[in-house]
Amino acid sequence: MPYVNIKITREGASAEQKAELISGVTELLARVLDKNPQTTVVVIDEVETDNWGIGGETVTRRRAEGR
Amino acid sequence: MPYVNIKITREGASAEQKAELISGVTELLARVLDKNPQTTVVVIDEVETDNWGIGGETVTRRRAEGR
Amino acid sequence: MPYVNIKITREGASAEQKAELISGVTELLARVLDKNPQTTVVVIDEVETDNWGIGGETVTRRRAEGR
Amino acid sequence: MPYVNIKITREGASAEQKAELISGVTELLARVLDKNPQTTVVVIDEVETDNWGIGGETVTRRRAEGR
Amino acid sequence: MPYVNIKITREGASAEQKAELISGVTELLARVLDKNPQTTVVVIDEVETDNWGIGGETVTRRRAEGR
Amino acid sequence: MPYVNIKITREGASAEQKAELISGVTELLARVLDKNPQTTVVVIDEVETDNWGIGGETVTRRRAEGR
């Protein structure tokens, strides 16, 4: 019954990688807290780099500066 | 003043259906808790089926298998 | 499979009222979008009035002024 | 270390405006609560006007009526 | 830089189990998407069973019925 | 009409500081994007340090080590 929301920048995660995140976090909750995998919901949000800030600046700017 | 966030998979909900969700949940909060409809905010997120997991797998895969 | 998050101020909603919100929004999603009620998840957050702002001020202050 | 999520309707905010929101809210948290700007995360969600409701109706409809 | 929010019912997860969820999901994101663990943020919300609904009813009621 | 959610660790923010965050972020959205302050909603979540992770460990542990 857990609900997990994963937010990452939209920088090319593949369908396979996203499926791996979903199975991995579902297994983690089953292993650590004995949560039922059948009702564990995982939602991945991919966010444009213009819309993600850290350190007071956008990821777009950080990427442009090679960070 | 309530805030409601509805997350569904992106599988063709029409503008009319989304408007019906918005009016329906606003009325529900007014009826049950006497919340002012004028300041009730509803945000609907439509999520790609690759990005939604349940039972440890993506909805994309479930749909491909006819589930 | 939808996920709904309802945020309200913590001002005395009863367990019965919260159960009514949960059943109501689950039925709404079944009726409008034919979503399976068995996997519809609803989470209600009750937020202290010091922590909820509208119009640039806290609900605590608004309530103190009879608004 | 704070996490801030800003949701606005998708109505033409520019990259510069979004960067200004990110720097502004990061500075606010540093000034008011002495939070470290280097680990403050800000995520902006721009939501279609069909998917945003207030007063029981969509923003699309409100805009069409000049509100 | 990812942000992960895990919502579970408040039913006795220990500090050690929560620490294990945090380290586990941080490692998962590093392994699958090469995300920097140092800036991965994880927030766990524990929700009262009165405030969590599935199948149109609260978890409180389901637990009372032995489900 | 914007909705802002600010998540911080529960480490003693005062009602005055939270009111200052609410007014500050509301003014920021009015200044940068001309958003109406009257319908801007801000919700602050204060999260236990056991439930907040960064760098793969809880804030509780980081604080215990003087970080």
Image (cartoon, coloured by chain):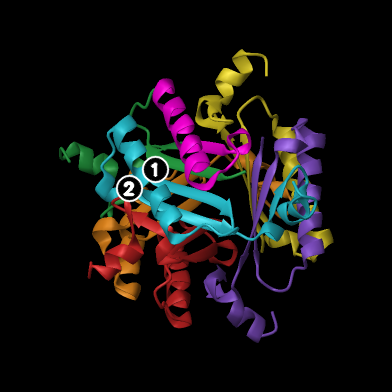
Chain colours: A green, B yellow, C purple, D orange, E cyan, F red
Q: Where is residue E40 in the image (x, y as percent from the top left)?
A: 32, 47
Q: Which amino acid does label 2 sit on?
A: Thr
Q: Residue E40 carries which label?
A: 2
Judge whether residue A18 is colored magenta.
yes
Q: What residue type is labelled 1?
A: Val
> What's the magenta region?
A15-43
Q: Is mark 1 on a helix, strand or loop?
A: helix
* Image position of C63 with respect to E15: above or below: below
Q: Which of marks 2 and 1 is nearer the N terminus?
A: 1
The reply to whether the C-beta atoms of the residues labelled 2 and 1 are less than 8 Å apart is yes
Q: In this view, does F13 lie to the left or right of E56?
A: left
How many numbered marks are there? Answer: 2
Residue lying at 76% horizontally and 37% vertically, measured from the top left: C37
Q: Quadrant of the N terminus of chain B?
A: bottom right
Q: Position of residue D47 (x, y in %)?
A: 54, 42
Predominant secondary structure in magenta?
helix
Q: In this view, does A2 lie to the left or right of E19?
A: right
Residue lying at 82% horizontally and 61% vertically, measured from the top left: B32
Q: In which quarter of the image is the C terminus of chain B?
A: top right
Q: Residue furthest top?
A: B65
Judge whether residue E67 is colored magenta.
no
Residue lying at 43% horizontally and 71% vertically, measured from the top left: F10
Chain under disc 1 = E
Image quadrant of residue F61? Answer: bottom left
Q: In this view, does E26 lie to the left or right of A25?
A: left
Q: Residue F29 carries which label?
A: none
Residue at numbered disc 1: E25
